Image (cartoon, grey):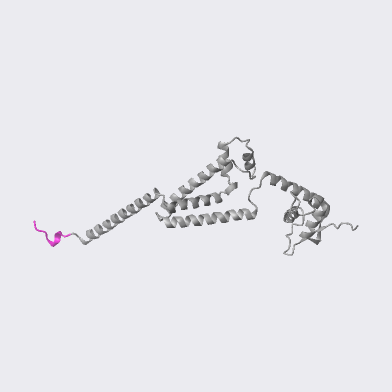
Amino acid sequence: MELTDADAAAPYALNVNRRTSRRLANQVEKKKSNEKAMEKVYQLGLKDVAGSLFFGGALYFATGSRNSGLIPFLGDFLYEEEEQWLVDRKAGLYSPVPAEFLAAYVCLVAALGVVIERLVLFYGTAGDTNLCLQLSVVALINGGFLELSRIDSGEKGVTRDEAELNTLWESEFEEFAEKKIVRKDSGSCHRNDVVKAYRRFYAKYRTNEVEGGPSDIDIEQLFVQWNKRVGSGVLASQAGFVKGVVLIEEPQL
């Protein structure tokens, strides 16, 4: 049977076949790309190990480092509730954890770092190891800045001894302020004068070198906190003067 021009494939059919071929080729290429990415997911190179450590470090800082809420949560499953360090942690205080528990916690964070690195590598960077490593470095830097901000703002937990000492200082300053500081709208006093008056009031804190005593900065902070609660509520000027409160002058001998 002889073919004629009428038997040739229609142009539309040829276009459909070309589009179908391109679509199939793209699907095959995408499948190969995914297979290569999956191969990388199951292979750990030096960059992958570094990225996992960086992501683990970022997670450690992001969750609060030594004050992480995961520590008392996990401690409940492994230790008795009466453990002193666990009691302190649940009270929001810092207390050293047992060495074996700390090692287990570090291993857990490291394992989670590996999981995060694998997820980012496959779903976030399509198998690009270099990009994944860069993202892990950025995450670690951000976690470090977050940790520094906690330290700067005083959010880091204190030990039980430090908390009890701070409570003692606060009660002592309350007693001092009750007898030596009064509110006066037209008056003001300097922070340094408050520090000097405080040390004169308490002979045991006469100098800055007394063991267990507040430093000058500690006394200034106690004054700021007291003034915010029951004083004028006015912040100190750049020169150190606080308006609305005055020191009671001591009698001249």
- Report how many numbered discs are placed on residues in the image: 0
On the image, which quarter does residue 223 sit in? bottom right
Q: Which residues are magenta?
A: 1-8
Q: Main secondary structure of the magenta part?
A: loop
Tell me, yes or no, whether the highlighted magenta stretch contains residue 64: no
Residue shown at 58% from the left, 36% from the top: 79
Residue shown at 14% from the left, 62% from the top: 5
Viewer-proximal residue, 228 or 14? 228
On the image, which quarter does residue 237 sit in? bottom right
Residue that protrudes farthest toward the right in the picture:
253
Residue 163 position (above or below residue 12): above
Residue shown at 56% from the left, 55% from the top: 144
Left or right position of 130 against 172: left
Q: Position of residue 147 (x, y in %)?
A: 58, 53
Viewer-proximal residue, 178 or 117? 117
Quadrant containing the N terminus is bottom left
Residue that protrudes farthest toward the left in the picture:
1
Tell me, yes or no, whether the highlighted magenta stretch contains residue 6: yes
Residue that protrudes farthest toward the bottom in the picture:
239
Viewer-proximal residue, 160 or 119? 160
Left or right position of 235 against 32: right
Left or right position of 41 against 8: right
Q: Position of residue 251 (x, y in %)?
A: 89, 57
Viewer-proximal residue, 159 or 27? 159
Q: Position of residue 49 (x, y in %)?
A: 45, 51
Quadrant containing the C terminus is bottom right
Q: Position of residue 192 (x, y in %)?
A: 77, 60
